Amino acid sequence: MNNRSHTLTTIAILLSLSCKKVIQVDLNNASPQVVITGEVTSAPGPYQVSISRTVDFSDINQFPPLAGALVIITDNKGMTDTLTSTIPGLYTTQRRWQGTPGTTYTLHVTIDSATYSASSTMPYPVQLDSVGFQDDARIRKTKIQAVPYFRDPAGIHNYYFFTETINGVPRNRDFIFDDRLSDGKYIHQPLNDDSTRLQIGDNLLLSMSCIDSAVYSYLNTLQQNTNPSKAQSTAPSNPNTNLSGGALGYFNAHTIEYKQVIVHL
Amino acid sequence: MNPLRLLPLLITIPAFSQSKCTIHGTIRDHSSGEILIGAAITILQQPGSGTISNAYGFYSLTLSTPRSIPAVTTIVASFIGYRPDTLYVSLPSDTLINIRLNPGDTQLQTAFVSVLKKDANITNPIMGVQKLSINEIKNVPVLFGEKDILKTIQLLPGIKSAGDGNSGFYVRGGASDQNLILLDEATVYNADHLLGFFSTFNSDAIKDVTVYKGGMPAEYGGRLSSVVDVKMNDGNDQRIGGSGGIGLIASHLNFEGPIKKDVGSFTISGRRTYADLFLHLSKDTNINKDQLYFYDINAKANYKLGTNDRLYLSGYLGKDKLGVSDVFGLQYGNTTATIRWNHTFNSRLFSNTSLIYSNYSYVINLNNTTSAINLTSTIRDFSLKEDLQNYIDQRNTLHFGLQTTQHTLIPGVLDATQSSSFNSVSLPKKYDLESAVYFSHDWSPINALHVNYGLRLTDFSIFGPGTFYSYDKAGNTIDSTTWSAGHIVKTYFNPEPRVSASYQLAPSSSVKAAYTRNVQNLHLLSNSTSNNPTDLWIPGSNNVKPEIADQVSIGYFKNLDNNQYELSAEAYYKTMQNQIDYKNGAQLRANANVEADLLFGKGRAYGLELFGKKKTGPLTGWISYTLSRTELKIDGINNNSWYPARQDITHDISIVSIWQASKKWTLSATWVYNTGSAVTFPNGKYEVDGQIAYYYTQRNAYRMPAYHRLDLAATILTKKTAHKENSWTFSVYNAYDRSNPYSIQFQQDPADASRTQAVQYTLFKIVPSVTYNYKF
């Protein structure tokens, strides 16, 4: 159930009366933190892990890469791969392998004397049948939303993750869905977004991934962190990461399936 | 002229036949028959003696030393805003005297001023209490000109507004769900209309409100930080009449009259907003199909069944409808009903029996071309209360009784069409029985000392049927037990001792001290800081223990210039146990395992409240200042260390002034200032999957900018006759157009992708409005 959309719509009514302005806020600086993001997918490798540091809020959006880390991915079937780096902060798998559903992958990162690790189990894939479109003209502006069609497998708690690439440009907005209230249903939930991005005739590449519950929890709380609603939400916080050792970011072993469609109504 | 004053009641009975005699009766408004709550009955020959009428206008005054009283005793009845009345009673004899007072200026009766018991705030041992009548609030400027009792009490010390567009309020560091809001004794679970722009209380229907911030009497219980006791008007028992108002955003109409003159009366008030009409005027075809309105109806009737019995029926129905086209809808509302039976057993024993119903529910509709979903949630109460007041003599009053409430909570029913992406589910209902017995003794061992001590014993029992889960720290289910219907799964029993005392230093000054324990068994979970109609009430359970607060307070009270000025200083310290917060990303909607996402901890709050009020004269009003601190320590938040609660507002100032400039014009102004609430802001940022994410270190370590606002209003009386009254009110909310922050968001600069920025949202800039009010 998409609660965020309720809240957002309610708030949209509220804020039709409001006005906004950019202000200066005097924020304290924090010591830089390690940020690790990495993934293993069901598509052939190589896979990448990126390591960087946080910057102060007032700084420009350039995040210092962290070079010289020891990065290893293992699985629960005895595979070990030590990643190497050609671009600072970006670490790439070396061995020729492909992620398989049901396997648990573990990321180990050592920076100086600090170690960080995270495990993620790749779920079994769910078939994406098709992608349709819905004109949500009735909510405020005319807005086209992509609608993925798929059958949720009954009896298992499934978590889904969608991304959109429009005319070759990836959208920096993720969509997540879980079957907490939809177990076994035929799913056709529009990928709801506040902004108007899709236009008729656009070339849309939609990816659907099955993710594990820890990754879902991370992405769910990340959305609250990066896309706060305009209403005062409860105290924001760092997303629930699956990394131990105090790093920010996450490690995600997920399936992936693509559908390319021309946007139409 | 009051006939009672012309006709002294002379009752001649031998002077020494008994050692005690009692006069009792009911005090009412002479022209409308409205009962007067808190009116004073004093013996002229014994300054400082006397009693005060209770919530039903009943008073009982026992004179224990007939020897010292002359054959004819002079009794003075007085109430603020009314001309005092003098009654001549020949004693001793138990006598029933019903009194009706005429509205007017107290000042005129200078002969009696010295004996009037207008200094109840000095002698009353109960502290941390504030009472406002609708007459006092009617000239306070408010948003959209819509008189609002809940917004007005936020101008009193120790009661803090939760911000613009929010009826929620914080009392002495408590959260907004820790206020017990009663409408004619029925619990109101959501006091908001239109997501908090207005409160549920239509001022046409309200007689007065009493707020207890600490030291609440033992008959109240169930919430941690305050009791807001709202009483509805009874209706005019003399003539049929009414009143109404037409404003920019809402209109209201009130109709009242006798069922039988002097015996019974009724009143009915209705109110409807028409903000949505503005939406319909919009050219945007998307917006003009939107719905945004509320209505409410208050109704009450009372009937005298005999000399000693009176029956009251009161009810409230309110409904909000919000809809975005036909895609999204939200409806919510309260329904309450109260049946009360007053019985006077004898001149000293007054009883009230109440049967109470309260219901709050919301429905969310989500529709798209292929499917429809409804999500419903309800909380429903049936209560029985028996309350007895025994006025033993002038030094002793006993108050005792019992109450029991059956709570039924329907946490979530999701109804989805077959073609929908969602399954229909119905979370199990929850059944609880909350019962209490209580007594309190109002005792004055010597003239200068008044003590009120009491005890409330609360029992909260959780009943089956249902499956009850236990969770580990990570929120995984480790155990579950299923119980059948009627089985008591868990009982929480809590004694709540309460004691308060006042010691009169001089006729016009006193010191007071109080200790109170309060227990709360129903808790509200909210995923935004402003109160939301879809916030979730959960009862205590095997996982959720009762919240407990202990408060000590001390105060100094002084009246100046014949009680024209009232000054007070109160300090409090409060500790709170079993406070509730929840984990990051907690799912509150239709979640059977919501308790797995909860976190528990404790809180502490302390502060100083200064209050000065001018009660009479052409210029009236008050100044209040609060200095306070509220902190929480919750396992799993802020590294388990103390942090400021959101309601931690250091300085809070309110100034309210009302000037009766002439017979026609009344001018009023309020100014409020408070420190910004505690908020969490990021200390850094980083990139995840191409998006900017924010790095947080400490909970609530920052402050919103300070909030301040000036509101102005002017009322002109265009017509005034005995029964008719027409007036216009012009008001300006936020007169100097301050951009007060509603929220501050951090985001990527839309103009420069390499930058981030902070954006402040403001809800209300300057808002002028005009209202026409009439009485017929």
Image (cartoon, rainbow, N blue to C red):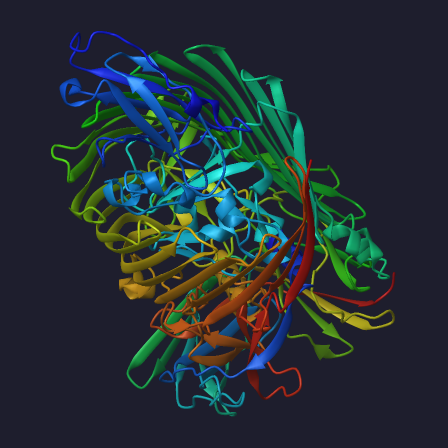
Query: Can residue B202 be seen by looking at this rendering?
Result: no
Q: Is residue B735 visible?
A: yes
Q: Nearer the viewer, residue B33 or B455?
A: B33
**Residue B62 appears in which quarter of the rendering?**
top left
Q: Up-down: is B736 above or below B217?
A: below
**Is residue B41 left or right of B711 when viewed as pictured?**
left
Q: Which corner quadrant of the image does residue B446 belong to?
A: top left
Write the residue at 55% across / 48% down: B138
Q: Quadrant of residue B365?
A: top right
Residue at the far left in the pictured view: B446
| Direction from residue B412 to residue B444 in the image, left or right | left
Q: Quadrant of the C terminus of chain B?
A: top right
**Where residue B554 appears, x then y in whole percent?**
20, 51
The answer to whether residue B614 is above or below residue B333 is: below
Report the number of numbered marks: 0
**A204 above or below A152?**
below
Residue beneath the point at 50% across and 57% down? B658
Q: State the image coordinates of residue B508 (x, y, percent, origin top left).
A: 23, 49
| Percent position of residue A6, x then y | 64, 53
Which residue is nearer to you in this view: B648 or B723?
B723
From the viewer's side, name the closer residue of B439 and A240: B439
Q: State the image coordinates of residue B232 (x, y, percent, origin top left).
A: 52, 33
